[in-house]
Image: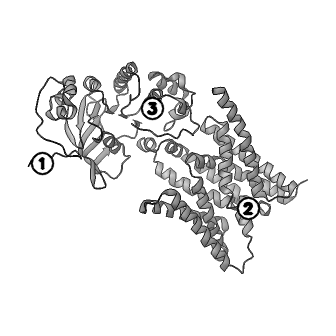
Amino acid sequence: MSLDKITLVRLKDAGIKQDEKWLVQGVSLEVNRGKIITLIGPNGSGKSTTAKIALGIYKNYEGTVEKFTNKIGYVPQKISIDWTLPLRVADFMVLTENLSADEIEEALSLTGVNHLVNKNLGNLSGGEFQRVLLARAISKKPDLLVLDEPVQGVDFTGEIALYELIKKISEKLNCGILLISHDLHMVMSATDHVVCLNGHVCCSGSPIDVAKDKEYKALFGDQASQTLSIYEHKHDHEHTDDGKIKQKN
Amino acid sequence: MFDDFFIRALVAGIGVAFITGPLGCFVVWRRLSYFGDTLAHSALLGVTIALSLEFNIALSVFITASVIALFLIQLQKKTNLPGDALLGLLAHSSLGIGLVTIGFLSFIRFDVMGLLFGDILAVTTNDLLIIWIGGVLILLTLRFIWKPLFASTVNYELAEAEGLKPDIAKAIFTLLMAAVIALSIKMIGLLLITGMLIIPAAFARNLSDTPKKMVLFSIIGGLLSVFLGLFSSLKLNTPSGPSIITAALILFVISLFKIKQTIKLKN
C-alpha cells in the first residue's frame, strides 16, 4: 500500500502583501502524509510567513491554499505567552485538545521533560519551554505538524535527539511535517523535499538536487554549500530587497 | 431574623458573584478591565433609552453595550488611534450622552446615585429571576466556548492554527460581558461593576497556580465579598455596592500575604 500521495495541505502560487510590498509570493508546495518538507532561506525570506499562510493564520493571502485536515500541531517560532496567567505545563498541554494524564506523560517523556509536568510555564528555561512546545504539538497525534525552528535554544545534544524524534514521529504517526530549520545537516539527512525561499521560491527539490542548484549557494554561501554539495557554480541573477529577481540592464 | 429585602439582595448577590467570578478571570487574563469600564459606562445610555421608551432595562443595557462593543471593533479597524484612547472616547462620550438624556427625562423620577453605585436593597423578585436565569445561560455559554477562548487567551496563533476558531469565541465573549453588565448594573452600579469583575479575580490569582483553581477562588472571593459587604452594609448602614467592593479589596489585601509567603518559600 502506498501512502505517498495523500496531500494534507497544498499551496498554489500563494503569497501575501503588506503595505503594497510582498512579504512572500508565488509559493507552491505540497505537504504529503509521511513526508518531511523543509523550508530554508535567509532571515526575512518568508519562511514563517509561508507556514502561517498554510496554517490559515493569515487570511488575506493571494493564490490558493487547500487544507485537507484539521488535526494540526503547530510549534510557532515566536510565542508570546502572558506569564501572569496561572498556567502549569499540564494545563498548557491540553490547550487545544483534551488529553489523558497518560497521554500528557507520554508526549512529555518523548521530548525529555516529563519531570516538569507540574511546573509553572513561566518558570521554564528557553530550552525546556521549546521541548514542551514540541511535546504539545505531537501529543494530539496530528495529521500535519508545522514546526517553525522547533529546537531553538535547545542544547546541542538535545538538538540532535529532538531532530531524530521528529523524524521518528513522522514515520510513527505517518503525518506530514512542514519544517523550518536552519540546521542544514538536519535538512540533508532527514528531509524528503526542500524548498529554498527568498521572498519567492528560489529552488526546490530533494536535498541533493537543491544543493546542486546555483541559487542555493548564492543564498547560503560557500560553507553551507560545502555542507550539502561539492558542486561549484555561478549565480546568474541578483535579488532586489524584497526578494524579487533583479532585472538586468 | 432578616427582612425580605435583605434575603433578596443576598440571593441576587450570590447569583452575581457566580457570574462575575469566571468572567472576571478572563477580564484579568485578557487585560480587558478598561474595556469592561467602557461597556459599563455605556450602560447608563442603555438605562435612559429603556426609561424613555418604557423598555426592559436589562435588555436595553445589554443591547447598548453590545452595540458599543461592535462600534469599538469598527473604530479599531478604521483609525490609527491606540486602543485605550478609543476606549476612553467611547466610555466618556456614552456616559456624557447618557447624562444629557437624563436631563431631558425630567418627568421621570430618577435615582442617578443608585445607577452609579448600585442599589442592591431595591432588588425585586423579578430581578432575581433575570439574574439567575441569565446567569445560568451566561455560564453555560462560557463553558461551551471555554476551550477556544482560553487557548486564544494564551496564544491566538496557536488556537487559530489548530482550528479552534478563536474569533467566534471572542465575539461571543464580548456579548457575555455586555450581558454581565446588564444583569449586575442594578446591584453593583455602573461605576463599580468592573471592580466586581477584577478584584475577586485578582484575589484568586494570588492563591492559584492553575486556571481552574483561579476561577474557583474568584467565585469564592466574590461570594465572600457579597456576604461581608451586605452584612456590614446592614449593620453600619453603608451603601451596599461600595461595601461589597470594599470587602473584596480587604480580601485581596489578605491574599497578598499568602503570595509573600510563597515567594519566600521559592527563594
Q: Nearer the viewer, mark 2 or mark 1?
A: 1
* Residue positioned 67% across, 78% down in the render: B103
Q: CA distance from mark 3 to mark 1?
A: 43 Å
Foreground residue, B129 or B111?
A: B111
Sooner in the amino-acid sequence: mark 3 or mark 1: 3
The image position of residue A140, as x and y in percent, is 45, 32
**Identity of the amino acid at label 3?**
Leu
Report if residue A230 is visible in the image: yes
Left/right placement of residue B258 relative to residue B176 reads right
Left/right placement of residue B78 relative to residue B113 reads left
* Residue positioned 53% across, 57% down in the render: B84
Query: Which part of the image, by quadrant, shows the C terminus of chain B?
Result: top right
Furthest-left residue in this view: A249
Mark 3 neighbour class, 10 Å CA radius: few under 14, some 14 to 19, many 20 or more = many
| Residue B118 tag number | 2
Instruction: Read off the residue under disc 3.
Output: A133
Q: Are the numbered discs 3 and 2 placed on the same chain, yes or no?
A: no
* Residue positioned 59% across, 49% down in the render: B27
At mark 3, the secondary structure is: helix
Q: Chain of mark 3?
A: A
Furthest-top residue in this view: A157
**Identity of the amino acid at label 1?**
Gln
**Identity of the amino acid at label 2?**
Gly
| Residue A247 tag number | 1
Q: Chain of mark 1?
A: A
The image quarter containing residue B98 is bottom right
At mark 1, the secondary structure is: loop
